[in-house]
Each structure stands twice: as structure tokens, then as C-alpha cells.
Image: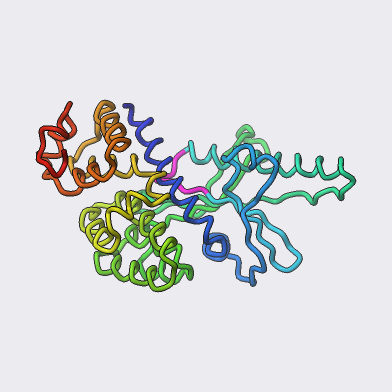
Amino acid sequence: MSRRKHEGDERSGIDTMLRHASRRHPQALPRSLFGVDDAVEDATWVETQVTARQRRVDRALCVRIGEQRRWLHVEWTVRLDRDICMRVYEYNHLLTMAAHTDGQAARGKGGHAAEPVSVDSVVVVLTGPKRGLPKTGFYRTSSKGEPFSGVRFRIEAIYLRTVMEIEAMGSVFWLVFVPLAVDADELHVARALDALQARTNQRDFEDLAMTMLALASLTKGYKRVMEVITSRVSRNVMMDNYLYRKGQEELWVRIAERRLGRPLTETERGRVESRLLKAPRKVANAVVDLSVEELAAWLAPNGHRRVGRQAA
């Protein structure tokens, strides 16, 4: 498997989990990501005729602040590159076209013409250089020397924040990012999990804990953090959790790669996928519990039959 394809799969799994988790916490995003200081009267996910048919257009919040309406677009990415910049540009156009299509439909039914839509975008970056990233990014479509045409967007390098800064972001949703903080350790993660459990219902806690586990797989100390999380959430719950199932292949591939210290081959990734379909709990046990040597043997052809009973 090419590095580009592998990174695309990695992004897709984590992006899916974050999009689903964030949809239950829309009020968490405007203040922390867009600097909205005024009281947010309403924050709902944008639904248009286009979003009903095309789920790519499901990343925007419609926020009402007094008489003002803003559409806020959020992208989650493992790392910042030109592909993400292009995606922000593409999304702005898709969302604008969706609003235009809805406006035409409303006028056709005798309704009022919709006001022009303004879209503000932010890219939340999960990993990157220690020197930091610029506060804003852009995708330019006009030639150099010509007036700017394209899109500009905010950049939130959340991996450079401290635990205290993340905790101060206000919503329990942001606590899932604690493992990414520059000063995070196992005690910080345990404290974040305790806060999640105290401030959410059981389903929300499980969803957020699984999202935290996926994010922890991006860090150097993933194994210790994983032990903290799995000590509070049973593996049966993990395997049955909806968000976990949506991203489980990429999550377990990522953890296996970190343990082995190398990328999985395309054949090995295929074996993980096929074994997840047949016996997901056994895959979890193998990736977490086996030694590095046993895990490498387990990934070989029929290795799950030859390695000890706990991974068989």
C-alpha cells in the first residue's frame, strides 16, 4: 500500500469518528474555534437538499447570534497539507451551491429568496511540527500578481495546546483531545476520563472515550494512554460501540504499526480487515496483549491459528 493511500485511510477513520462525536456537541465549536464571544442562541448542523444526498456536505454549523446567521465549517486532519487546503476550498463551493439550490427550490414554491450565505472555515490539525503552524491558511485559484481569488481559513493546531488550555475550552467534547496536548501524561488522561464520565450519559461517554482512544494512537505514549482508557471501558463495550466500529480498522492498524515500529503491508492490512469481520474481539486482544514478536507472527498467513489461544 502506498504511503499516500495509507495516510488517506488513517485520516478517513479519525475524521469519521470526530465528525460523529462532534455532531452531538454543536455548541462546543463556535467559541473555541471561531472566537465567537457573544451568546450563541442556536447552533445546529446545516441540512440542505444536497446534504441529504451527499454526506460530504455535513461539516457545517448554522449559528445564530442575535439577528446574525453564520455558517461555520470544520475540517479535522491528522496533518496539514495542500490536499486539506483543496478540501476546504471544495467544501466552501459545495456548501454555497447547496444553499443556492435550496434558495431556488424555495422561490419555486413561492417562498422568499434566501440571504447570501457566508462560510467561515477552520482546520483542526492533530499532529505537526513543534515549531507550530500559521494561524491562517489559504487555497489560491487566481494567478500570482492578480487579486486574490480562492478561500482563506483558520488553522487550529490543537496538538500544540497544553492540557490546561484544552480543559479551558469549555465543553466535555474537547477533553477527548487531552492525549494530544504537549504536556499530557497518564494522570491527565485519567482525569479527563473521570470528567467525561461525571458529565455525560453512558452512551456519550463511550463515544467520547473511543474517540479519545483513536486520537491517542497518534501519540508516542499511546500504549500507556490506551491502558488508561481500556481500564475504564470494557473491550466488549469498545467492540460494540458505533463510533468505534466506524473507525476500528484504521484504529487497530495504527496501534499495530506503532507496536511493530513499521507500516503494515497491504497484505497485512487485508488480514486485519478480514479478521475484524470474523472476530473483532480477538483482533483487539491480539493487538493489545501479544508481544511484538507474537503480533508479527499473528499477522502472517494463518498466524491467528498458530499463535496462542488468546489470539486464535
Residue at (41, 66) in percent of width and height: 166
The location of residue 79, given as percent across then percent down, is 40, 45
Residue at (22, 43) in percent of width and height: 282
Residue at (25, 56) in percent of width and height: 226
Question: Taking 106 as reference, is 290 left or right?
Answer: left
Q: Quadrant of the N terminus?
A: top left
The location of residue 199, given as percent across then percent down, is 43, 72
Residue at (75, 39) in percent of width and height: 101
Examine the rendered structure and indicate whether residue 91 appears above or below residue 176: above
Question: Taking 55 as reference, is 49 left or right?
Answer: right
Q: Nearer the viewer, residue 180 or 128?
A: 180
Q: Nearer the viewer, residue 226 or 148?
A: 226
Q: Nearer the viewer, residue 85 or 261?
A: 261
Residue range corresponding to the magenta coloring: 75-81
Q: Nearer the viewer, residue 166 or 14?
A: 14
Examine the rendered structure and indicate whether residue 246 appears above or below residue 266: below
Residue 236 belongs to the span the image colors magenta: no
